[in-house]
Amino acid sequence: MSPLRPRTQAAIVAAFVSAFALGLLFSAAAARAQHGHPELMAALLAVTILTGLALSFLFWLIVGRPLARLGERARNWRLGQPWSCDVHAACPEMRDLLNRMQDLTGRLNEQYRIAKDLVAMKSRLIAVVSHELNNAISVIQVAADALEYADRIGPADREKMLGVIKAQSRTVALTVSNLLSLGRLESGRFAVARKRLDLPDLLRSCALLMDVLCKKKRLRLSLALPAEAPPVWADGNALTLVMTNLLSNAIKYTPEGGAIWLGLRREATKPGSVTVYVRDTGIGISERDRERIFSANFRCENGKAMAGGFGLGLALARSILKSHDAAIEVESAPGRGSTFSFRLPVWRPGLEAEAPRERAAA
């Protein structure tokens, strides 16, 4: 508890001294009244009563009335409502109490708003995910039913149906993986385990995983890998999730017949790191939306018109890269495609012993 202000302490001391002095005067008057001065006794009694009433009124004015108003406002206040209490507080302690109440209700309202937004976001997320998964499963079922009558369709159609099943299965798998990873992020159970990693092999594997989605839209996916690349210090499973989300994002927002490049490069100014990038010839991103796209459940308007989804991939990718002490960067303009890139540290002997304990993705 904060100590009383010096001015308040002085007021309390003065009140006690005044009361003590009045008591002494009243005692003296009572003694004299016994010796034939009843008028003095009556006068001092009246002064004492009036002084007591004045001190009581002053105490009520400074403390009692503000506390009563504050209590009434607190009883009528509801979570989510703005706080206002038009109380004039004479003593600084009461003003501190009012300010603390203002701060407390503000923080409670902010937490309440965040909780409401989270509930609303999860409700929208469930609706969108249910719709997306239902659509994908319906397409898979139709393609599977068509394959039951393989003798009635030609080889080209069979190949097409198999491609549809593979593409939709990959979409469902990525969606479920993102949801599971999001749940682990929220519960703090998504911990990275970095080690020596061969990055070109991982990028080839990710390109192979997403190849079926590229073929579905007739996109050209090219790998730009140097003949020799040093190993990096990263978590392979977590990085695979990052790359598949970046590639999936590029595939979604690149029109049919476009191109996507997945690669890595060394920069002379940063010899201790390797830059990984995904570049596309897609619809691009406006300057206003470049930061907002990393917020979960946000998608720009032209993106909504072009492809389905619910905007988790980039938010998840940035959180995982943050746990690698890496930042994701975006170069883009509407109609001119996008490039997403990040840097990873080059592995060197003894790095495992020097590295601090791995932490959960933020």
Image (tube, rainbow, N blue to C red):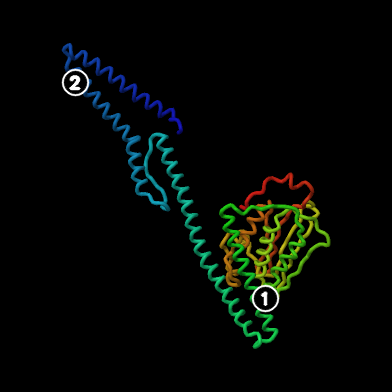
Q: Quadrant of residue 48?
A: top left
Crowd rating for badge 1 (residues with CA inside 10 Å; few <14, some 14–19, many 20+): some
What amino acid type should be assigned to the residue bearing mark 2? Ala
SS of the residue under disc 1: helix
- Residue 186, above or below 339: above
Observer-nearest of 189 and 46: 189
Quick one: SS at disc 2? helix
Question: Which mark, residue 293?
Answer: none
Write down the quadrant of residue 55 in the picture.
top left
CA gap, disc 2 to disc 1? Answer: 106 Å
The picture places residue 281, in percent across and down from the top left corner, at 70, 70
- Residue at image coords 30%, 19%: 21
* Of the image marks 2 and 1, the number of the one nearer the N terminus: 2
Q: Nearer the viewer, residue 310 or 76?
A: 310
Give the residue type at disc 1.
Lys
Point out residue 284 in the picture as x, y percentages from the top left corner: 66, 67
Q: Quadrant of the N terminus?
A: top left
Q: Residue at x 68, y 86 (%)?
A: 154
Q: Which residue is mark 1?
A: 216
Q: Residue furthest top?
A: 35
Q: How many marks?
A: 2
Residue at left offset 58%, top offset 74%:
137
Rendering coords of residue 119 (x, y %) = 49, 59
Vertical placement of residue 333 versus 266, above or below:
below
Of circles 2 and 1, the one toward us is 1
Residue 57, relative to residue 109: is it above or below?
above
Furthest residue in direction bottom, as rendered: 152
For disc 2, the neighbor class at 10 Å (few under 14, some 14 to 19, many from 20) is some
Picture layout, residue 27 above or below residue 340:
above
Q: Which residue is mark 2?
A: 42
284 vs 109, left or right, is right
